[in-house]
Amino acid sequence: MKNRLRLLNSDSLIACLMFVLILLGSCSKDVIYFPDSVQGEVDKAIVNGFDGIIVYVNAPGRTSFYSAGFDNREKQTLADAHSLFKIASISKLYIAASAAKLVANNQLSLDAKLTDLLPEVEGKIENANEISLEMMLQHRSGIIDYSDEPEIEGETFDEHMSFMARVYDKEASFKPNKKHSYSNSNYLLIAEIIDRTLGYSHHDYIQAKILDPLDLINTYNVYQDSDTTRVMSGYLIGWDPNLRSWDFPLPGGNMVATAEDVGTFLRALIDGTLFTDKEQEIYTSVYEYEHTGWLPGYCSIARYHSDIDAVVVQFVNTSGTESFWLDIERVYNRIVMALEKEESKS
């Protein structure tokens, strides 16, 4: 028995060593890799299976644009750093900013309960009478994500609340304010709340209070409002058709913009250009200063890096599995490392 145990332990040890070697082999490029330049990293990103990539950098004394690969692989059209792009959930930053402005102007309250704001959901969304606007903004409501639920009859993009029927009468993920769990349902509901508070579309509010003041002429609330010929093509791994014309007009994932416009917005969100002091304080208390986005064919990252005072926006017009998203993040991190290296030399 002792010999058998030693054999088992030996086999286990060998198996563990083999696993470590395989892991190190697969990660060795990342472990020993030293990025050289941003453009170099953008060029290398194409070998990860990206159809095309766009990167925008805004740092002190520097605004830079980078691109590689294809905008349209069928026509072999090269990626253009100034193309429009479906920014998906980065759209939530604009909704959160709008909510902060309305709260500061006493048109909304962070403490207001969902049943008071949208009475028809009472008895349909669990704990709706306990869920506040603040909890929804922070993804602490416990409301399950409608995008994870099966389609139902009667859904229409003309009435985005119709998609909330997917979550009606279903168990919440957790009690309100007990956890954090990202849910697209929160921001669809917030958009509806803003619409009813204003008496008109939150799209018009975003245009008047955010896009126009910042001169963001290359940002659109929905795909159909844009010059669609300027929108970068999108590709889903394992699916041949170009997804550029596939529209997703639901709040929190519907906006189209250039990388430069997203970067300009993010910079203004951070440096006080967009907000009054009161609005800034409210926004800081409820939401973040970065976001990622995913739609079929479109992956995006927009973040601020305080150590180098840089806004970095990355668009990739290919999407796939969760493991593919890890490649998206890995390339982004390499680009930031290259930028840090370049900044240290300047």
Image (cartoon, rainbow, N blue to C red):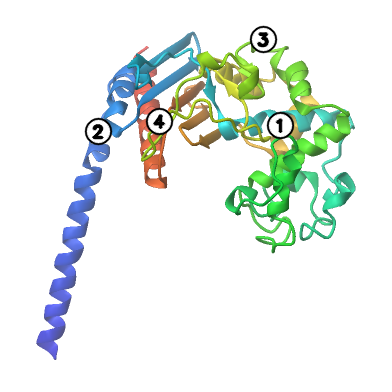
Rendered residue at 67%/23% (across/down):
221
Q: Position of residue 111 (x, y in %)?
A: 84, 46
Q: Which residue is mark 1?
A: 95
Q: CA distance from mark 1 to mark 3?
A: 18 Å
| Residue 33 marker | 2
Local packing at callout 4 (Cα closer than 10 Å; few below 14, some 14-19, many 20+) is many
Rendered residue at 27%/21% (across/down):
36
Q: Residue furthest bottom?
A: 1
Q: Which residue is mark 4?
A: 332
Q: CA distance from mark 3 to mark 4?
A: 27 Å
In the rendered structure, which disc, 2 or 1, sits on the residue that comes first in sequence?
Answer: 2
Q: Tell me the mark number nearer the camera, choosing from 4 and 1.
A: 1
Q: Tell me the mark number nearer the camera, choosing from 3 and 2.
A: 3
Residue 290 visible to the viewer? no
The amino acid beneath tag 1 is Ile
Q: CA distance from mark 4 to mark 1?
A: 25 Å
Rendered residue at 61%/54% (across/down):
149
Quadrant of the rendered structure where residue 329 is? top left
In the rendered structure, which disc, 2 or 4, sits on the residue that comes first in sequence?
Answer: 2
Q: CA distance from mark 3 to mark 2?
A: 39 Å
Disc count in the image?
Answer: 4
Q: Which residue is mark 3?
A: 215
